[in-house]
Image (cartoon, rainbow, N blue to C red):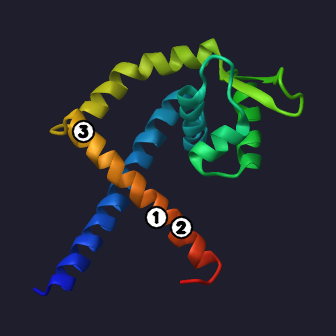
């Protein structure tokens, strides 16, 4: 097989592996969401808030950026999650135009109840990879993600 054909095959395999991982992660997130009686996007919003909040709450814009979704969708879904008592939304003390979103004690308790299962799941998913391997992989994936965003932008403006 020629060198270019080998590279093409490796790239195709990589892309299909990413598709498979994405599909499996969606199923996993859907399962966690169903456990809490929420949707998969709502689960991801809770996880993003949990990840981003450093004790003062987090803005809807920060959540939208983390998940790469439209801020209006985050606003809509956080209102629903607030009604379900999973989130609290309070006016930012720094700027009254913005809300600071935090997990409620109810949400924190629900997520904590799932933590052992989530840890077992992570152990299974990343079995055989040590910290150094994960750092290497994350560095490469971050580069691919950055390049993918650039390629997508070029495609959307007709440069590709």
Residue highlighted by disc 3: 126
Residue highlighted by disc 2: 150
Residue highlighted by disc 1: 147
Per the image, label 3 sits on a secondary structure element best described as loop
Where residue 140 sits: x, y (%)?
33, 54
Query: Badges 1 and 2: C-beta atoms under 8 Å apart?
Result: yes
Where residue 136 sits: x, y (%)?
27, 46
* Quadrant of the image occupied by residue 5: bottom left
Query: Badges 1 and 3: C-beta atoms under 8 Å apart?
Result: no
> Which is more toward the observer, 1 or 118?
1
Per the image, label 1 sits on a secondary structure element best described as helix
Question: Which numbered disc, 3 or 2, marks the residue closer to the eye?
Answer: 2
Q: Which mark is residue 86?
A: none
- Residue found 55% across the figure and 70% down from its top: 152
- Number of other residues with Cα within 10 Å of mark 2, as a class: few under 14, some 14 to 19, many 20 or more: few
Of labels 1 and 3, earlier in sequence is: 3
Farthest left residue in view: 1
- Number of other residues with Cα within 10 Å of mark 1, as a class: few under 14, some 14 to 19, many 20 or more: few
In-image side of 47 versus 136 (left or right): right
* Quadrant of the image occupied by residue 120: top left
- Number of other residues with Cα within 10 Å of mark 3, as a class: few under 14, some 14 to 19, many 20 or more: few
- Residue found 58% across the figure and 46% down from its top: 67
Vertical relation: 28 (above or below) 83: below
Question: Which numbered disc, 1 or 3, marks the residue closer to the eye?
Answer: 1
Where residue 92 sits: x, y (%)?
81, 24
Where residue 79 sits: x, y (%)?
77, 33
Per the image, label 2 sits on a secondary structure element best described as helix
> Which is more toward the observer, 135 or 119?
135
- Give how far apart the Cα atoms at labels 1 and 3 are: 25 Å
In-image side of 113 versus 92 (left or right): left
């Amino acid at each position: 097989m020629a060198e270019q054909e080998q590279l093409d095959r490796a790239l195709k395999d990589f892309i299909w592996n990413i598709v498979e991982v994405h599909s499996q992660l969606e199923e996993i997130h859907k399962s966690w969401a169903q456990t809490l009686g929420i949707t998969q996007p709502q689960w991801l919003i809770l996880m993003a808030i949990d990840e981003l909040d450093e004790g003062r709450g987090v803005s809807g814009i920060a959540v939208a950026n983390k998940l790469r979704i439209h801020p209006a969708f985050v606003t809509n879904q956080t209102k629903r999650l607030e009604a379900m008592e999973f989130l609290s939304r309070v006016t930012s003390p720094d700027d009254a135009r913005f809300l600071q979103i935090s997990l409620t004690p109810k949400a924190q308790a629900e997520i904590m109840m799932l933590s052992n299962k989530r840890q077992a799941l992570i152990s299974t998913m990343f079995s055989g990879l040590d910290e150094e391997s994960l750092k290497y992989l994350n560095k490469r994936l971050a580069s691919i993600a950055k390049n993918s965003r650039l390629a997508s932008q070029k495609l959307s403006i007709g440069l590709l």
